[in-house]
Amino acid sequence: MKHRNWISVVILLLVFVFAFSLAAFAANGNSGEAAAQGFRKENAKVFVFMILIIAVFIWSSAAAMKGKKPYIRRIAGLQAVEEAVGRATEMGKPVLFVAGVEDVDNVQTLAGLSVLSHIAEKCARYDTPLLMPNRYGVTMITAQEVVKESYLRAGRPDAYKQDNIYFVSSDQFALVAHTDGLMVREETAANFYMGSFYAESLILAETGSTTGAIQIAGTANAHQLPFFVAACDYTLIGEEFYAASAYLSQDPKLLGGIRGQDIIKVFIMASILIGIICVTLGDAVPALAGLKSFAGLFKI
Amino acid sequence: MIEKISKMDRRIIFVLITIALTVSLIYSVDLPIKISPPVKTMYDTIENIPEGSRILFSFDYGPSTEPEVGGTAEAVLRHLFKRNIKVVAITLWDEGESIGDEVTERIAKEMGKKEEEDWIYLGFKFGGPTGSGVIEPMGTDFHKVFPVTRKKEGKPSKSTNDVPILQDVNNYDAFKAVISFSAGVPGIKEYLQMANSRYKIPVTGACSKVTTPELMPLLNSGQLSGLAAGVIGGAEYEKLMNYKGKAHKFAFAQSVVHIIIIGLIVLGNIMFFLSKKRS
Amino acid sequence: MIQRQIPIFLAFLGGAIMLLDYFIAHPYLAWLRENLTNWARIGFTFALFLGIINLVQVNLKKVARQSAGWGYNAVLLICVMVTMGFGFVQGPTEDGTIYKWMFNNIYRHCTATMFGLLAFFIASAAFRAFRAKNVEATLLLVTAIVVMLGNVPLGDIFVQNILPSAPKWLLPSYLQTKIMEIFVTAGQRAILIAAAIGLVAVSMKILAGIDRSYFGGD
């Protein structure tokens, strides 16, 4: 299975590069509308950077699969998932999962659904009910499939209840009002908030805290992080949330991807540092004014 | 006693806040408002727009954030009409549809402006979760995005080509700026990402206070031409406009609640240290 | 096997078209992008019907079984039917209709009320969470107080009443501006950059079919 995955990745990438080259060649070949067509030069730097990220990512994942599994530091929020589900099982209360208030086209919702599959598997093993109210129909359907598969993987397809993953309303605050009522009525013992959240984050987290539930939140929306940090027991911040799926699965290729992300971050940090030095020197020393053009390399 | 206060029932806090808010909203006090640089920049951006030009005004908020951003929207509309700048208003939020209608009509009437000549409200257009289905296409063909005007009671919709204020509008080149009042997504950030970065149109606006940190890097880099954040930003803009509206009233209420929250935090910490000392 | 490969391929194709359009200006690509976006929007809109069907099914079951709190489920069903009914018959944006009246006089106030709860919850969360348990918590607590004071005019008045000759840099409004401009901006940029890289990585994994947990896993 591993080799087939990588062959398909490489084929897909080659198809993309081929299609890209063909399109660029075909576009440049049309003399009539050449001015309005062809490669968008203003996005060239973005393209180069994208290729760099993909290359580093693929190399890192491949290296992880061949060699030692990369070390990922302990993420308290993810370590606590097992504890949270266990607590709910002991108390005989359900687990609540909210995958954010955005639809499935938002990457955070997809990341949340990845975490859901792991949580659902644990709930299946421990025979703990999992409740998941949804804001959008597509998210609901996707979540139903994810949970069904998780229950199958855990060997408990009989325990799966489709009605536990349901649609509430496409209005943000209607979903929140319902979820708050659900937390208080059902006395959920473990609440997971994994996805894109806006103003409702504190309303959810604070209500959950009044019921005494253990709460684990994860979002990349930085403006909601303070509310989750204040009201939840554990919070996954930004990139930790995106890394959750890899962390929970401990799949070497996904863990390798996280290492790849860290390599890119180091590259960005180094660029920032070099840029600061170049621009500062360029300003301070007239003879080195040419160094300031380094900053222009990164301007989009 | 210390334990009791330290673990005070939430309901006592709720009652305290209720009383504070009620009293401060009824008996409002004028506070000295200091104008902050981002609000001044926004004001200056609008001041520098030539008279008779056109701007795109986007109501990207709903009823929930109306108290926070609505006051600023009204103040800016008054500023635009005072300077005889033509306003083409839209909304990317379905909840903001009737808010946009009510606010533009009321302020335009107050300032003696004529619909379809000095202003027009085109209503809500669904552009997807990030508004890309509206923000991007407006840069190539405005009339394709808004082919007809909004239907109103006693006023059927008609082609936007027949509306005087929209006749020579093809894309963002027809507008001097985009002013977005946003409480989330889609909003200012999406206009910056799609309209400003691609079509180079200046973007300014107001936002809810909680989303301000996200926009600070864009403000500091100069991509955003000014920002009025939250109720206080609205009060500052009202001060620049020399009138006291909704934002001023809410600013006092917000101030009182902030002081109470700080008092509660200090009280909680005093009890925490006392109980620590005891044990 | 083919059941899994087709969705992965379609996901890749859709993503590739969007990416290509970002880098290449071509009428065919623009046409594809526009239509794919429209089809996606139409698909998502139809998914709303699925949601409504699910809503009716789940709540109807509870009403039929007379489960605990079934009265609320019945109220929900009635509200859904009434709102949808008036919306279909009279149109959702027509002025002077019952639907518009319900929107302006019920929905708007309900959402504003829910949002208003935040004021109370912030107070109770702040009281509970902002305790000086360690150095980091103390730093958080002090910063929160300075920013809250600096955000409102009363903050400067408060400090100036205690210290009439307080220098400018001691005023909460000045400190709050500096905290926002320097520390918050730096922190936000760091989170933004890291989250953006994470987003690219997750998107890449999904487009390449490496991460399939969003449709059930391996």
Image (cartoon, coloured by chain):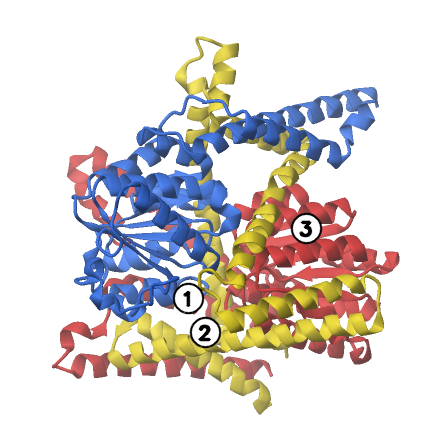
Residue C62, percent from left and from top = 79, 70
The chain drawn in yellow is C
Residue at 66% across, 77% down: A145
Whether residue B67 is visible to the viewer of this picture, yes or no, is yes
Q: Are marks 1 and 3 on the same chain?
A: no
Q: Are marks 2 and 1 on the same chain?
A: no
Q: Give me the C-alpha separation between circle 2 and circle 1.
A: 9 Å
Q: Check whether the beta carbons of the residues at disc 2 and disc 3 lie within 8 A of each other.
A: no
Residue at 61% across, 33% down: C136
Q: Give me the C-alpha separation between circle 2 and circle 3.
A: 38 Å
Chain for numbered disc 1? B
Looking at the image, which residue sits at the far bottom?
C2
Residue under circle 2?
C41
Q: Amino acid at mark 3?
A: Ala
Q: Write down the colour of chain B.
A: blue
Q: Dot 2 lies on which element?
A: helix
Residue under circle 3?
A76
- Name the one closer to the observer, C21 or B202: B202
A121 relative to A203, above or below = below
Q: Nearer the viewer, mark 2 or mark 3?
A: 2
Residue under circle 1?
B126
Residue B104, percent from left and from top = 35, 49
Q: Does residue C53 appear left or right of residue B217 in this picture?
A: right
Residue A222, percent from left and from top = 51, 48
